[in-house]
Every structure is written in structure tokens, then in C-alpha cells.
Image (cartoon, rainbow, N blue to C red):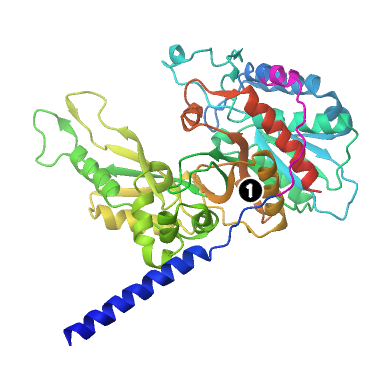
């Protein structure tokens, strides 16, 4: 009897292994092999144009704060001087004074137009970090093969890169079949309510329907996905939402020489520890599932066996990806305690210590689901939990990766970055594209740059820079994508 059971077990195990290998080897590749395109010469003037734009401190501080209007006015004038054909042949509409909407009329009015988005504002430089910059953050220096300064990566390189592409095509007499909008908001860094949102409202009132929207987003990166040795062009096809949750503990305060046995700060701290210990559940769905479908066929055999059989190894995959902050972020709603407030003096017990928890919401998350999770994990009536309504963005749902527009984008990536794989992914940060949901169901977030992982630290950090070589390729990408989009 024991031998029979052992035989059945081994036979079942063998059958399972066979099924796993069959599933792995039957995975079809989702990559394309389009014909290569000739390289386009990009003028050195492009470097100077971006450099000058960086010198103009178009900073967004916080919602409601005054802005340096002169910086934006000078930027607009710089764009006009740098791209004369764009400004003589395209229609320009200024939205809410400082956002720009260009319209390039296509030859075929039956085709839906497309919209490319970017933003002209930048984040401020953190006080005390100025000395850490190799080049002053608003000098726009060109040195050692790089263009340095705030906005070089986020996001003036896309603004100027798109305009360089259009100017190039106009010089060569190109007329697109499909009309093109270039939408440059001026307050993306503070959620785009006065820029991109107003642009979207303007287009909605005119009944515009778009074939697709392309905004800033993910990059061509290497080494992020386990089992994949080639660089990967990650295209954001869904976007996380954004929320801030305030935790607070009411107390009597008093002198610190007579602290209660359980201090309000301890109660608050325990709540934060509990939240970090008991994370939101991980899920391999939506954009993250699509990511694995695109990359599993390209993985080394061991990882391919695992990722091709998610029905069996989903918990293993989650554990693998949860080990790194970047990959963990695409699995779940993340929490990040970012602000703490206590007593105004060292010898005073705080009467209402509080903390703000910043969340990036996975698709499907709601206010109700957030509160349910927080209250379940904290499980202490002394801790007040409230969602701050001043900044709450619901997640943007998944775009169709089978749509023709995605295929044209994928084709262009393969043509300009032939060494890279292409994969849809979840955008974990926020972009202006969320404001264009009503205009199109096809929204993609991709910045055509091949970045080393260390270069990503420049975003909102020190020594932000873009290589001259990468910037030229970015411009070539936009030129080719305009052609492919017809």
C-alpha cells in the first residue's frame, strides 16, 4: 500500500514538473522585431536650448503658494525664440496664463488626435543641499557629456525634446496625418490642478476625443526584474492614486516631569510601527500581471518556470518582489510616514501629537478600504484616523495593451532602443495624465531615456542631469513616434 502511495505521489510530481515546463516553453514572446530606422542628426543647439530652460527657476512650492511668474514668462519667450517654426505653424493656446497647449493640425480629420503631455515646473532644491551639487542647480551647465540642473530629467527634457522633434519635422516639410496636441502644464509637481486639469477641461468643452495620451513616466532600466538580463523599457499603463492619512492622539499634555505610564507619543509610534509591520496585501493583478506576461518569456529558465506558473508560485513571486522597494511598490498600496508633529518644547508633553502617512494607492483602492485597513491594523480607539481631503487622487485604471496605439508605442521603443525589451507596468508616482482620463482610455507614461539606476536619484534630489547622448535619442524617439502614430 505504501509503495502504491509513493508511486502515485512520484507520478503526480512528475506530471506537475512536466506541466510546469510545458507552460514555460509555450509562453509566446510579446516582443516585436520591427525594421530599424536611420538615425537622425540632432543639432548641438538642442543642448543649449535645454540648458537655457534649466536656468529659469519655474518652481512649484505648494498648492496656493505664489509662483515666480517672471520665470514662466521668460521660459515661454525662450521657447518662442528657440522654436520659430513651431510658433509660426502650430496654434498655441495659453491656459490659465502659464500652461501651454499647442495644436498641430493633421491632414486627415477623420483620425482621432493624440496628446503628448509634459510639464514646465520643477521642485525646489532642498535647503542645505546646494553644496552637494557638482554644478549649481539652476546654472544649466553642460559638462562631461551631461546637461546639469533642476528639470534636466523632471521634466523640461520632455518639454524641449517634444518641441525639438516638431521643429525638426517642420523643417523637413512633414505634415502629420493625425492631429497632435502638445500639453505642457505648469504645476504638475503640486498635482496639476491649475495646469493639466484646466487643459483637459478646455478640450472636453470642445468635444475632443483622443486616440491616446503620452505623458512622462517610466524609463529604460536594467536589473529591476529578477531573471531578466536585458534592459527593459517600462511603459506605465496604469497609475497609482495618492492619499494622505493623518493619525493623531488626543491627550491632556502637561509637564514632562510627570509623564503618564503610556505617553501619547508612544501610542502614536506604536500605530506607525503596526502599519509598517502589517502592510496592505500584495496582488499580482492588472498592470503588474501584464508586466509579468511580457517579461516571463524573456527570463532565465529558473525564473521562467516560476513566473510562467503564477497559479502555483504566486506567493513565491510576491516574496521575491517584496524584497526590493521598487518592485514591492508595484505589488501593493504603500505607506510612508513622512511628517511628525509633537511638542513645541522639550519639557512639555504634547497634547495632540500627530503623523501624516503618505499612501500610493493600488488600482481598486478607495477611501473606505483605506480606513478599514488602518483601523483594523491599529486597533486602538485612542488613535484618530482621518483621510486628508486636500489631496486625494483615485488610481487610474489599466489601459489596453492590445490597443493599436500601444503597439505603435512599443514598435517605436524597439526601433530606438533595439537592445531593450518592452513591458507594461504600474506607474507608482503621480503624473498629469490622470487629468486626461475623460479624453482617452489609452494613457501611457514613458520617458524615452536609458538610465543607469544611480541616475534615478537625481529626480527631486541632487545632481540632476541628463547625458547629451540620451537627450539626442529622446528627440529621435519623438520624431519616430510622430511618424508611427499616423
Residue at 53% across, 12% down:
135
Principal SS element in the magenta part?
Answer: loop
Figure check: 433 above or below 101: below
Residue bearing mark 1 = 444
Between residues 11 and 360, which one lies in front from this camera angle? 11
Please count the marks in the image: 1
Element assignment for label 1: strand
* Residue that protrudes farthest toward the bottom in the picture: 1
| Residue 169 in which image quadrant | top right
Residue 178 drawn at (x, y percent): 83, 48
Figure check: 187 above or below 311: above
Examine the structure image and report whether residue 159 is included in the region drawn in magenta. Answer: no
Is 372 displayed left or right of 67 in the figure?
Answer: left
| Residue 4 in which image quadrant | bottom left
Residue 256 drawn at (x, y percent): 13, 29
Question: Does the image show residue 159?
Answer: no
Disc 1: CA contacts within 10 A as few (<14), some (14-19) or many (>=20): many
Residue 305 drawn at (x, y percent): 42, 60
Q: Which residues are magenta?
A: 34-50
| Residue 252 in which image quadrant | top left
Is 242 displayed left or right of 281 in the figure?
Answer: right
Is 276 displayed left or right of 156 in the figure?
Answer: left
Residue at 73% across, 18% down:
44
Between residues 58 and 319, which one lies in front from this camera angle? 319
Between residues 327 and 399, which one lies in front from this camera angle? 327
Residue 222 drawn at (x, y percent): 50, 39
Examine the structure image and report whether residue 36 is included in the region drawn in magenta. Answer: yes
Figure check: 129 above or below 38: above
Amino acid at each position: 500500500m505504501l509503495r502504491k502511495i509513493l508511486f502515485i505521489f512520484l507520478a503526480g510530481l512528475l506530471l506537475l514538473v512536466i506541466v510546469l515546463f510545458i507552460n514555460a516553453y509555450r509562453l509566446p514572446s510579446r516582443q516585436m522585431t520591427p525594421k530599424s530606422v536611420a538615425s537622425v542628426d540632432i543639432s548641438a543647439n538642442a543642448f543649449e536650448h535645454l540648458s537655457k530652460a534649466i536656468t529659469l527657476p519655474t518652481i512649484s512650492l505648494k498648492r496656493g503658494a505664489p509662483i515666480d511668474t517672471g520665470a514662466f514668462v521668460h521660459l515661454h519667450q525662450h521657447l518662442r525664440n528657440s522654436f520659430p517654426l513651431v510658433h509660426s505653424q502650430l496654434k498655441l493656446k495659453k491656459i490659465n496664463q502659464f500652461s501651454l497647449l499647442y495644436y498641430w493640425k493633421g491632414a486627415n480629420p477623420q483620425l482621432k488626435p493624440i496628446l503628448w503631455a509634459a510639464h514646465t515646473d520643477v521642485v525646489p532644491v532642498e535647503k542645505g543641499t546646494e553644496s552637494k551639487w557638482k554644478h549649481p542647480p539652476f546654472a544649466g551647465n553642460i559638462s562631461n557629456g551631461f546637461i546639469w540642473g533642476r528639470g534636466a530629467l523632471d521634466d523640461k527634457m520632455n518639454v524641449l525634446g517634444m518641441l525639438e522633434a516638431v521643429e525638426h519635422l517642420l523643417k523637413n516639410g512633414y505634415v502629420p496625418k493625425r492631429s497632435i496636441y502638445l500639453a505642457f502644464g505648469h504645476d504638475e509637481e503640486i498635482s496639476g490642478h491649475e495646469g493639466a486639469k484646466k487643459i483637459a477641461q478646455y478640450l472636453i468643452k470642445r468635444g475632443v476625443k483622443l486616440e491616446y495620451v503620452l505623458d512622462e513616466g517610466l524609463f529604460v532600466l536594467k536589473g529591476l526584474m529578477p531573471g531578466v538580463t536585458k534592459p527593459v523599457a517600462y511603459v506605465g499603463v496604469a497609475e497609482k492614486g495618492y492619499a494622505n492619512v493623518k493619525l493623531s492622539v488626543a491627550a491632556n499634555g502637561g509637564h514632562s516631569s510627570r509623564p503618564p505610564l503610556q505617553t501619547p507619543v508612544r501610542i502614536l509610534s506604536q500605530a506607525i510601527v503596526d502599519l509598517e509591520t502589517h502592510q496592505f496585501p500584495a496582488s499580482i493583478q492588472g498592470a503588474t500581471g501584464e508586466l509579468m506576461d511580457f517579461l516571463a518569456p524573456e527570463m532565465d529558465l529558473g525564473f521562467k518556470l516560476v513566473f510562467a506558473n503564477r497559479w502555483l508560485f504566486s506567493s513565491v513571486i510576491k516574496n521575491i518582489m517584496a524584497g526590493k522597494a521598487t518592485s514591492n511598490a508595484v505589488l501593493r498600496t504603500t505607506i510612508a510616514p513622512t511628517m511628525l508633529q509633537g511638542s513645541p518644547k522639550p519639557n512639555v508633553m504634547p497634547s495632540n501629537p500627530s503623523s501624516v502617512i503618505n499612501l500610493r494607492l493600488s488600482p481598486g483602492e478607495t477611501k473606505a478600504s483605506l480606513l478599514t485597513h488602518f483601523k483594523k491594523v491599529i486597533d486602538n480607539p485612542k488613535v484618530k484616523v482621518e483621510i486628508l481631503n486636500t489631496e486625494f487622487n483615485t488610481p487610474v485604471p489599466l489601459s489596453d495593451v492590445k490597443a493599436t496605439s500601444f503597439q505603435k508605442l512599443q514598435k517605436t521603443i524597439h526601433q530606438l532602443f533595439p537592445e531593450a525589451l518592452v513591458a507594461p507596468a504600474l506607474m507608482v508616482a503621480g503624473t498629469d495624465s490622470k487629468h486626461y482620463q475623460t479624453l482617452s482610455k489609452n494613457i501611457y507614461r514613458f520617458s524615452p531615456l536609458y538610465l543607469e539606476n544611480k541616475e534615478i536619484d537625481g529626480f527631486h534630489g541632487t545632481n540632476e542631469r541628463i547625458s547629451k547622448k540620451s537627450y539626442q535619442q529622446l528627440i529621435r524617439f519623438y520624431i519616430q513616434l510622430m511618424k508611427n502614430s499616423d
